[in-house]
Amino acid sequence: AHLEAASVDLVVTSPPYNIGIRYGNYVDTAERTSYLDWCEQWAGEVRRLLRPNGSLFLNVGATPSNPMLPHEMVLRLRQIFVLQNTIHWIKAITIPNGSGQQISPGHFKPISSPRFLNDCHEYVFHLTPEGKTPLDRLALGVPYADKSNIARWSHTGGMDRRCRGNAWFIPYETIQRRARERPHPATFPIQLATNCILLHGLTRTQRMLDPFLG
């Protein structure tokens, strides 16, 4: 609240999800309306701090018993921000490799309930003041699989690079002891934040904020 208005270029953050995670001091079990009211309060402060072409990348997950939380949050925040992009952070995925074998790279927390599927993804909502914030789409670009597209499509500009899209596969690093190697109860990979910074644009980012320091 003491920071100067319109002084921040980029916010990348992940607030508590209100799903009962055991933090050191914060109680993660607020009544739903109270929790959403609180989210609207801190988001309003973030909106005050962002420059007109700034970005808020908001990482929010859910649980099978609480699946509507990310959607309820972003609907509440549409009074403050424009939802410019929705990114799917894929933690684990099962796909066939070149020889047709089913492989499952990545990590996820298994669910034992017979009612629910294993939850292998979270949302990253790209929220902006006016929905007009330019992005460095090729900062996360990938090469074309079919090189003939480079000459066939005029928008390539002759570059062998295309937009990665809104599905990011970013697995956790394998660890041996969580208490020692990943002690925070709600971590996310450094690469997730790095992607957001690169996408917003390194040359356009002079001041960045994480209000939750996760």
Image (cartoon, rainbow, N blue to C red):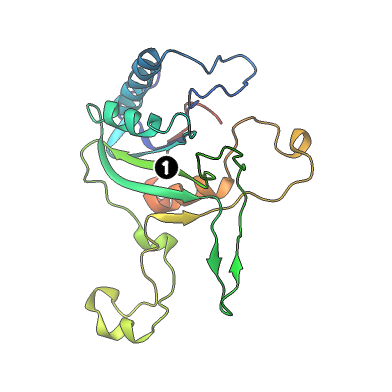
- In the rendered image, the residue lying farthest to the front is 114
Q: In this view, does 70 lie above or below 149?
A: above
Closer to us: 46 or 116: 116
Residue 210 lies left or right of residue 214; in this view the side is left
Q: Where on the picture, by quarter, is residue 143?
A: bottom left
Residue 43 lies left or right of residue 109; in this view the side is left
Residue 6 lies left or right of residue 117; in this view the side is left
What residue is rendered at 32% in x and 53% in y? 135
Q: In x, y percent, where is residue 112?
A: 61, 39
Q: Is mark 1 on a helix, strand or loop?
A: strand
Q: Is residue 160 above or below residue 204?
A: below
What residue is rendered at 24% in x and 35% in y? 129
Q: In x, y percent, where is residue 152?
A: 26, 84
Q: Is residue 88 above or below residue 150?
A: above
Q: In x, y percent, where is residue 156?
A: 29, 75
Closer to us: 128 or 169: 169
Neighbour class for label 1 at 10 Å: few (<14), some, many (≥20)?
some
Q: In x, y percent, where is residue 170?
A: 54, 53
The residue to which callout 1 is attached is 123
Amino acid found under the numbered disc labelled 1: Tyr
Q: Where on the picture, by quarter, is residue 101?
A: bottom right
